[in-house]
Amino acid sequence: MQTTTAPLSSIASRRRFMGQGATLSAVAVALLAGKDALAQGQKADTSKDVGILNVALGLEHEAINAYQLGAASGLLQKPVLDVAVQFQGHHKTHRDALIATIQKLGGTPVAEKKLDDYAKALNAGALKGQADVLDLAARLELGATNAYLSVIPALGDRELAKVAARLAADETMHFTVLNGALGRPLPPGALSFGA
């Protein structure tokens, strides 16, 4: 099986998100959770939040388009194709929540690129079979899991931390299902994610 590697731009974006994630304010997380009233009682520098959330939005755009490339490739068989489309739908929900939060914070959401740009960045031409598509998706999901987990320690409010944890849980579920579809074993040790 041929495997692809995540492009450096994606790896750099995840590292930047994880490195900046600790500064995400309670206001941003409250808005992301749809708890506008809770956000009104908090103080924060929302310009930093907008930047961090735009990095997360960029990762969601990438995931949506990666699943689109996989679905359109003709390489995915049923029921794997159905799962990929379902996961793409989850990422669209994440995207929509991020866009709404960025706008509520007075920011401008980062624009989605053209599908061809994602195809080039993700080296979609190297995808030769279903396993290659699943491997790419699993690596993107693992990166997203770790990125979302990185913001939780900075949140003093349990309700706000729960929102970040729910996003990370979605990504972890995606990674686990994709890893299983590839026939890979479960991680051998405990505390495998977020390290």
Image: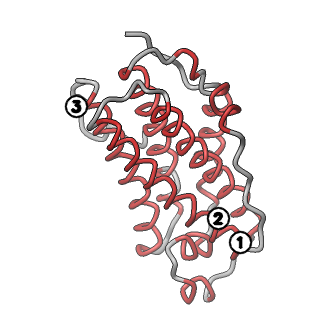
Q: Amino acid at mark 3?
A: Leu
Residue at the image point whose x is 45% and y is 35% from the top:
71
Disc 3 is placed on an element classified as loop
The answer to which quarter of the image holds residue 26 is bottom right
Residue labelled with disc 2: 99
Say the numbered circle drawn on residue 140.
Answer: none
Residue 27: give x, y in percent of width and height: 62, 75
Q: Is residue 176 left or right of residue 3?
A: left
| Quadrant holding the N terminus | top left
CA gap between label 3 and label 1 equals: 39 Å
Say the numbered circle drawn on residue 186.
Answer: 3
Residue at the image point whose x is 37% and y is 29% from the top:
76
CA gap between label 2 and label 1 equals: 6 Å
Mark 3 Cα-neighbour bin, 10 Å: few <14, some 14–19, many ≥20 = few
Residue 176: give x, y in percent of width and height: 29, 39
Residue at the image point whose x is 46% and y is 43% from the top:
146
Mark 2 and mark 1 residues within 8 Å of each other at the beta carbon: yes
Residue nearest the observer in this picture, 105 or 86: 86
All told, the count of numbered labels is 3
CA gap between label 2 and label 3 equals: 34 Å
Residue 90: give x, y in percent of width and height: 43, 55
Residue at the image point whose x is 32% and y is 34% from the top:
178
The answer to which quarter of the image holds residue 64 is top right
| Quadrant holding the C terminus | top left
Q: Amino acid at mark 2?
A: Ile
The answer to which quarter of the image holds residue 135 is top left
Residue labelled with disc 1: 103
Mark 2 Cα-neighbour bin, 10 Å: few <14, some 14–19, many ≥20 = many
Q: Is residue 47 left or right of residue 183?
A: right
Residue 70: give x, y in percent of width and height: 47, 32
Tag in front: 3 or 1: 1
